Image (cartoon, rainbow, N blue to C red):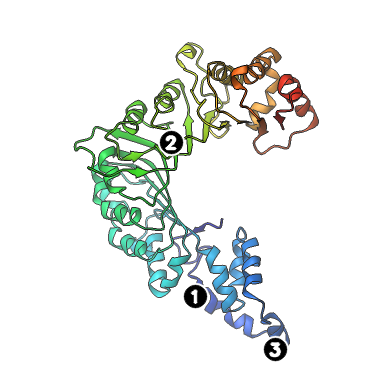
Amino acid sequence: MVVLRLVTVSLGPWRRPHAELKELAFVFFSLPAMVVAASCSPLPQEIIDQITDELQEDFSTLKACALVSRSWKESSQRHIFSDIFLEAPSEPLPLEMSPCHTFHRLLTTSPHLGRHVRHLEICDEGRTSDSTRRWLLASVEILMSVISLLTCLSSVDISFSGLWWEDVLSIKNVLVAIFQLESLRSVTLEDFQVRLNELFSLLRSRSICDLSISAIEVLPDLFPPSPRFSMPLHELSLSLQHIQHAQDFMEWLISPTSVVDLSVSKKLSLSVANSDEANAAQVLLENPILQNPDILEIQTLNCSVHMPHRREECLPPRFSRFRHVQLRLVEALACEHCGNSLLDIVLWWTRSFEAIQDSNIEEISLTLTKRSASRFHHVPNYVWHALDAALCRPKMSSLRSVHLKVEDLEIDKALLLRLLQAFPILYHRGLLRV
């Protein structure tokens, strides 16, 4: 997916496409007539679309393709404008030079470009403590105008970076305009204060089926939930890391008064960073509100459960109702000093599978990071064998395959041999996939 980052300086790497076309037009038409004729020979639109589809990650080539002809231009613009990122200026500049205002001027002159936007990211990092100077709060009308032209928008990411809930309410018309787009399917909310009932009263949409929430501070609700409305979610992604009062948030999700309908949810993704968050996740996993769950993904930081003095408090997650369980380590924020964290997590996984009494699990994916794979031999073989035995218990008879992966790393022969030695029962039963 091509990301169009709107810069705020006139001589930066991005300029308005129609201005760039005008600037480069004389180069094209100064070519010999034979070259021009050859380059303009018609191709079926299907072939042009296939070419630009293959080039969708190559932004500079797409811009060059847009100079060829109308058919190439329209096909290239589908990818050039498919992903828009609006953020605060990188340096103090007049508001009219912000990415939001720049993009608004572009859409004003070329409104057809709005239909190419599939993903929109709105980010106000709050470089100033004065809320009146934050670009998002000062650009409500302009942003409303932009959103009205994004008729095919399917996903939006919104990050307010510490914005107070009262300030969030000041842009509620923008949020409502976004959430009411019939084309919208996926919403990501990150890093702000929230009163849950008030937020989800703005999220009154039956088109949204995928919701992701992370790094929010849950405030006490002042008003009851909206009556006779529930938003059916087919996919829910929660990063409990940095969510204050995660337990309260989980209890709100499963409350009968919640406006979120999880009974139709097929995929649940949870990211946890410590035992408190793992236990908060348990509130949701144990609740019968998940009637027909299919896929569960639990992401764990490399050092997540490395708390020897609290390990007994980190309960094993109950995921026996899911058909496909994906357990994944995350490298980005891994602690450099937690050399034995992989051992703790393997023990946590083992206890989780040992606790299963009635399983529907058919497929399991275990994904390690590069760092944890390099420390694979630091975990004694008997620990891996215990996990192997837990996965092969009679209670796990529905299991059809176990996939072992290392993120962003080609598994060499030495690591492959260690993996096979770590899971001898799975290997001999033909269930192991590496």
Label at residue 179: none
Residue type for callout 2: Leu
Quarter holding the N terminus is bottom right
Q: Residue furthest right?
A: 413
Q: Quick check: 413 above or below 394?
A: below
Q: Residues under labels 3 and 1: Cα distance?
A: 24 Å
Q: Nearer the viewer, residue 378 or 125?
A: 378
Which residue in the protein does label 1 denote? 19
For disc 3, the neighbor class at 10 Å (few under 14, some 14 to 19, many from 20) is few
Q: Residue furthest left?
A: 223
- Apparent side of residue 53 relative to residue 184 in the rendered image (left or right): right
- Asked whether the viewer can see residue 359, the reply is yes
Q: Secondary structure at mark 2?
A: strand
Q: Quadrant of residue 193?
A: top left
Q: Which x, y percent locates residue 385?
A: 68, 16
Q: Quick check: 180 above or below 413?
A: below
Q: Quadrant of residue 361?
A: top right
Residue type for callout 1: Ala
Which residue in the protein does label 3 denote? 33
- Point 43% across, 66% down: residue: 114
Q: Residues under labels 3 and 2: Cα distance?
A: 59 Å
Q: Which tag, 2 or 1, sits closer to the chain's start? A: 1
- Apparent side of residue 135 relative to residue 408 in the rendered image (left or right): left
Q: Which x, y percent locates residue 136?
A: 32, 53
